[in-house]
Amino acid sequence: MAQLRAARTGPGVAGDTLAPDLVEALAGAALEEATRLGCTSAELRVERIRSQHLALRDAKVETSADHGELGMGLRVLLDGAVGFAATVELDPSVAAGLARQAVEAAAVTRPALDRRVELADEPAHGERSWRSSFRRDPVEVPLAEKVELLGSWSRRLLESPAVDHVQATLLAVSEEKHLVSSAGTRTHQRRVRLQPVVEAVAIAGDGSFETMRSCAPPAGRGFEYLQGEGWDFDAELEAMPGWLEEKLASPTVEPGAYDLVIDPTNLWLTIHESIGHALELDRALGYEAAYAGTSFATPDGIGSLVYGSPVMNVTGDRTAEHGLATIGFDDEGVEAQSFDLVRDGVLAGYQLDRRIAAEAGIARSNGCAFADSPLHIPIQRMANVSLRPAPGAGPSLDELIGAVERGIYVVGDKSWSIDMQRYNFQFTGQRFFVIDHGRLAHQLRDVAYQGQTTAFWRSMEAVGGESTYLLGGAFNCGKGQPGQVAPVSHGSPAALFRQVAVLNARAESGR
């Protein structure tokens, strides 16, 4: 932290921004030395990342943490091998030394390679700037204001006799990133994101308990999100005690096959695990086998693998407004794009970075390289992978529910599991409502739905229209060795699935 503080107060680093002349000096020194040493490609990233975590229990502050990271990382390609080096010292003389370290790293890794590393071509974009859509950077909002907001939410829930405890948390991140490449691309980007979570607990007289968590998704938005722009927090907080009280008194589910209407607050996670990860091409080619697994959806299935029903259309998208994985340019200088992954139920493509695109014989990356720190090398990461709604007006949520005689409506995410090939899975949720002859009835407890990826998505009979669409997501998608985390969103409409296996999660656990 001493070095970080020195860098923050040093020349060219002031307040909330990195001075352009400092970035240019660092890039000039690093790239000039990399070129002199024979590198055919080099990219320098200079980044400032500030992350905050605030947690209240029963309206009292339990945790408050504010973490800053500042540094630069240089990736080079030399004689078919990649080298990477990074530092927290923002000094041009250090940047030149960074190039020498990266070249040494490439020399060390070269003997271990079974093939030369190539990078798919990407045109030079010149100097470009990009900023995500927000008004108030959440990390710059005074701590007292954030504590008061979470405290007011907590007190509001605790006023209900149905609620015994409340946990309220807020994660907020602000990123400033500059990339300069030897190809002539200079990008300057700024984005923010935040994740609010409120969870209420009810304890029964016999000692059993139930929880009810808010369904507000994490978002690439500013603090205005917490004040009602993009989510109706007042309405959700008003309804949570009643939902929780009903859940605690509700009957347990009878296992069997049910028609399911799955809300986007739940379905985003199934998309993430069974589509998003399965269609990362580095995983499908076996590069994650030692750690995160492989994929059943191998490249020979493009154009032929029936992933789901004909109403299934899935895109990878780095451009969606407020998406957690939304950027202007990725960490290899590739411009953000939107692309098809599943088209009319058939496998159509993968998420790529430049190395994997070149290895697969694909002309251009679709912009999926990301590093979670200036001190980490970029790796292939997930785009905003989303199930598209029905064209036109499409069915409403009520119309989807109205098409079910006997079934369950699933809302909110909770626990999950999936195998290492992204094929066999199980998901639970926050709320489950009986659907009886096209109408919602009482809640159920202990519901978990289970399936195999292709069978599950082939059972999808209908997707809702735009009115049912929501961008969900996660802050903490893990991948890589050493491990990195990436934020990613997943848009989804509500959707109707026929005859899905439902388990009683409590009975399965042996309780």
Image: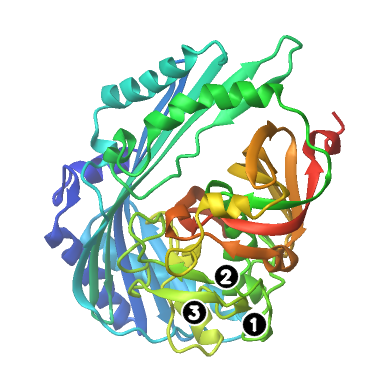
> Disc 1 and disc 2: Cα gap in Å?
10 Å
Residue designated by label 2: 280
Q: Residue at x 84, y 39 (%)?
A: 508
- Please name the residue that numbered disc 3 is placed on: 355
Looking at the rendered structure, the number of numbered marks drawn on it comes to: 3
Badge 1 element: helix
State which tag comes first along the sequence, 1 or 3: 1
Circle 2 SS class = loop
Say which of 342 and 173 sits in front.
Answer: 342
- Element assignment for label 3: helix
Q: Which mark is residue 299?
A: 1
Closest to the observer, 394 or 218? 394
Q: Is residue 489 above or below residue 440?
A: below
Q: Position of residue 267 (x, y in %)?
A: 58, 53
Is residue 71 or residue 60 the one in the foreground? Answer: 60
Q: Nearer the viewer, mark 1 or mark 3?
A: 1
Quarter of the image containing the C terminus?
top right
Choose mark 2 or mark 3, whichever is in front: 2
Q: Residue at x 41, y 63 (%)?
A: 85
